[in-house]
Image: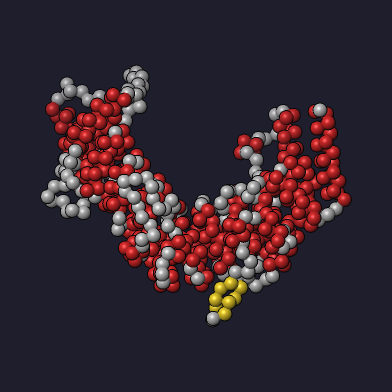
Amino acid sequence: MTTKQPYTKSKRKFNSSKGEGTNSVDKDTPSNKKRALKQSRQSHRPHSEVVVTAKELWNKLRMKSNTKDDIAKLMDELMTLLRGKFNRIALQHDASRVVQSAIQFGTVEQRLEIVTEICSGSGNSNTISSTTGNIVELAKSQYSHFVVLKMIKYCKDDKSVNFLVKSFKGHINKLAVHAVGARVIELLFATLPPKFTSKLKLEVYGPRFTLFNDSITISSNTSTSTTSTHPTLQSIIQNQNNKSKAKDAALESLSSIIHKGIDKGLFSFAYFQQLLCEYVTVAPPSDVRALCPSLVDHSIHLLSTRSGSRVVAECAAYGTPKDRKRIMKSLKGYTLSSLLHCDAYIAILRLCDVTDDTVTVQKSILAELQVRPKKDDMKKKTVGPPDSDGEEEEDNDDSLRSPIIELALSETGSKLLLLLLAKDEESRKKYFDPAELEVLRANPTITENGEEVPTSKKNSKTRRMELLQYMKKILVQLCELHADELLRSRCGSKVMKEIHDTYPSKELTKAIVDACDLDCGSTTAAD
């Protein structure tokens, strides 16, 4: 009877004492054939031997235990090895990581050398065209664009930035709608100051603004500039002599980029949301309505920035009833989180403000607010009685809290309640700032057959009263349960005042008086 050998976790090692026949069998295994084929392909790449050596240095360079002296020594070796070859090596998917590390760990002078070589296209052999291997080609590559991202992130000195901006000049429109290049444009405008990137932004409005716009000047060798923010569509039109022609030309160019970006699905990029915002706030309402069907299904992605939220708000204002329903469908399940978001809340407010179908608003938006937030997953899985009296008390406290108390105490969430409670435009002005009032302007209209037609048929007061009637019970309950919390909150006290003015009752007055008595009693006891 044979005994079973004990299992060991150690890997089997190649035994050199075996015969030649065994070695030949091992070489014919599929894994060895695959490995040999990979090495054969890599050996035919440009600078293959240099890449192998560079990878070894890269493995040492990225170790966290390295000291400053170790990094400096390794960087000197790596720069000596790759000098004149950065363009070609950056285009290889495995070797591009070596270039990324060189940018990350290099000194200012070393980074400038790398940026200069890549942007100028120097170091290319005679078989490479003058456009191959430059920064624009790297920005379009699935792997090499990470090199460009590192350059934008780490190369902050003026000389390096000027090289980068000069290399991108004339290519913004193509990169802005490229699936990979869009990531580079996003970081470029988010990281570099406007004094360097303002003229690049002008390219999206058409060649006439890039060539003949003297209102924006960029200083290449000083920190001063005539502009502190990026130009916008509205600002460049104001600086033109013939505003009508300038507006038409800019809208045409911007519309072309926007439609290409929509086809590529670039809704989550901040720069693209900014372009959309500039377009919908300047374009005629009929053009905005024509664009709505392409945007409304992606509303949840647009709410990540203030510009994107403005786009959704304008789509709600000028869109058809069908477009508004599609917006509500896109935001299903995210109503509360959107109202608590610093930017997204304005889109929800505008949607409630202009939608004629108040029943759909009640079911899709307001009904979500009347459901208590779900408990933690651990509490859901708990079977049987609670483990302690403290947990039982906590559950009882949660059951007594109003579902909209968090909303009422929030700076942004309370504005939905105030929008419904405010009786007229004068009351709104007390609770909303000028920027919000611009978005929530009354009675938006659209031109049809030469006539101005309102986009909402129902009277605004009627819409407000129908929504407010749906919220009446929970609003009164909110004040009765949480009068003390609301009175102590700057936002909650505004909501409390409007609810008391709209639905006065003895119970509500008593709750407010009791809260004040409790506060006075606690103050006296403390004294």
Q: Residue furthest left?
A: 126
Q: Nearer the viewer, residue 390 or 200?
A: 200
Residue sitting at 67 percent across and 48 percent down? Answer: 407
Left or right: residue 291 compared with residue 99: right
Q: Is residue 475 visible?
A: yes
x and y percentages locating residue 269 in the rendered image: 44, 53
**Location of residue 301 with respect to 107 vertically, above or below:** below
Left or right: residue 57 compared with residue 244: left
x and y percentages locating residue 97 in the rendered image: 29, 39
Q: Is residue 11 visible?
A: no
Please tell me in which quadrant of the rendered image residue 498 appears.
Answer: bottom right
Residue sitting at 65 percent across and 66 percent down? Answer: 357
**Location of residue 70 with respect to 220 vertically, above or below:** above
Residue sitting at 83 percent across and 31 percent down? Answer: 524
Left or right: residue 358 compared with residue 54: right
Which image quarter is the C terminus in? top right
x and y percentages locating residue 200 in the rendered image: 35, 55
Q: Nearer the viewer, residue 198 or 132?
A: 198
Q: Residue furthest bottom?
A: 449
Color style of the picture: secondary structure
Residue sitting at 65 percent across and 43 percent down? Answer: 374
Picture mark count: 0
Which image quarter is the N terminus in? top left
x and y percentages locating residue 478 in the rendered image: 76, 48
Please tell me in which quadrant of the rendered image residue 34 appears.
Answer: top left
Q: Residue furthest right?
A: 506
Q: Nearer the viewer, residue 383 or 485?
A: 485
